[in-house]
Image (spheres, rainbow, N blue to C red):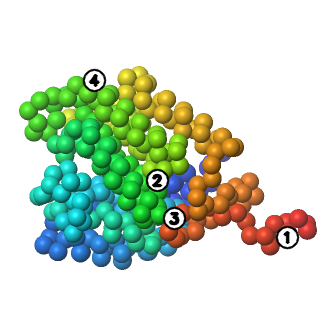
Amino acid sequence: MARLPRITYADDPTILGWNMMNEPRNEHKKGAAELQSWIKKVSPFVKRQAPNQLLTVGSEGFYQASNCAASQLNPVPAGWPFATGQDHLPNHALAAIDYAGIHLWPDVWSRDDRPWGVRWIQAHAENAALLGKPLVIEEFGKFVGGIYDRQHTETAGRQLAYYKGVYEEVGKSILGSGAIKGILFWRWKAADPTIVLGSDDQAATLDTGGKVFQQVIAPFSERVAKAMTDPKRPIVKGCVPANLGTTPATLVIGSQPQLQPPPPAAKSAMAAQ
């Protein structure tokens, strides 16, 4: 059997990007300033290790009180979101951060009303447009059954309805050239059906044959895939299509990631041969 070529993570074309940390938090008195300082210091270092891959913070997307809309946008108007030290806009405004990422856990945050969830997504999409960077909902899940310390149990019907609402909002952006460019749900049973985690993870797990996957995720993925292969699709503002048939794409670090074609000199040299 032929051996696969050895390749470093930084050169792996199947890796889109990296989180600096999963849900970084700093609950010290000066936690927000310390977390911002850490992102500012470490993000350029990570980019130097993997210059052709994207980088984001990995945070949930909470705001500090210095943001005048924090009390309306955070899951609760005061308290624990401020204690995380996260401050979405400055955290993602740094030059080495290529895209903005957020999470959405309505049950974990005890905020499962769908209007708030849509507002959470829309607010961060507006932030991403302001930053000139794409937005990805990197973690999203809705539970079924008993969850944490909640006194009630969530039904499969409520899970399905919530998924439909979230994916509809994301789809409008992706298919309409908005700031939201992707969504990742947690979690897919088919990824490794042998894994057994805690009851909370099991409550969020989606089966391929289930209604959420069949009625929401599969059709959504098909629509997006079809749109992305349409030669008449609109070009994203600020990006130049790469000629991937002749040379690997090179990521240009700036206000927003771009794919650049081979330089003219390289093309003429090839033609001369």
Estimate the x, y position of residue 136 in percent, counting from the top left: 42, 51
Residue 170 appears left or right of 23: right
Residue linked to disc 4? 157
Distance of mark 3 from mark 1, alpha carbons? 30 Å
Residue type at mark 4: give it. Gly
**Which numbered mark, 3 or 1, is in the foreground of this view?**
3
Would you say residue 144 is visible in this rendering?
A: yes
Of pointers 3 and 1, the one earlier in the residue sequence: 3
Mark 2 surroundings: few (<14), some (14-19) or many (≥20) residues within 10 A: many
Mark 3 surroundings: few (<14), some (14-19) or many (≥20) residues within 10 A: some
Determine whether the residue tagged by mark 3 lies in a helix, strand or loop: loop
Q: Residue furthest front?
A: 68
Quarter of the picture holding the N terminus: top right
Q: Are marks 1 and 2 in contact (CB under 8 Å)?
A: no
Residue 212 tag number:
none
> Is residue 59 depicted above or below 149 in this figure?
below
Residue type at mark 3: give it. Gln
Distance of mark 1 from mark 4, alpha carbons? 61 Å
Residue linked to disc 2? 179
Quadrant of residue 158 within the rendered picture? top left
Of pointers 1 and 4, the one earlier in the residue sequence: 4
Of pointers 2 and 4, the one earlier in the residue sequence: 4
Residue type at mark 2: give it. Ala
Residue linked to disc 3? 256
Residue at 37 percent of width and 66 percent of height: 92
Residue 269 tag number:
1
Q: Are marks 1 and 4 in contact (CB under 8 Å)?
A: no
Determine whether the residue tagged by mark 4 lies in a helix, strand or loop: helix
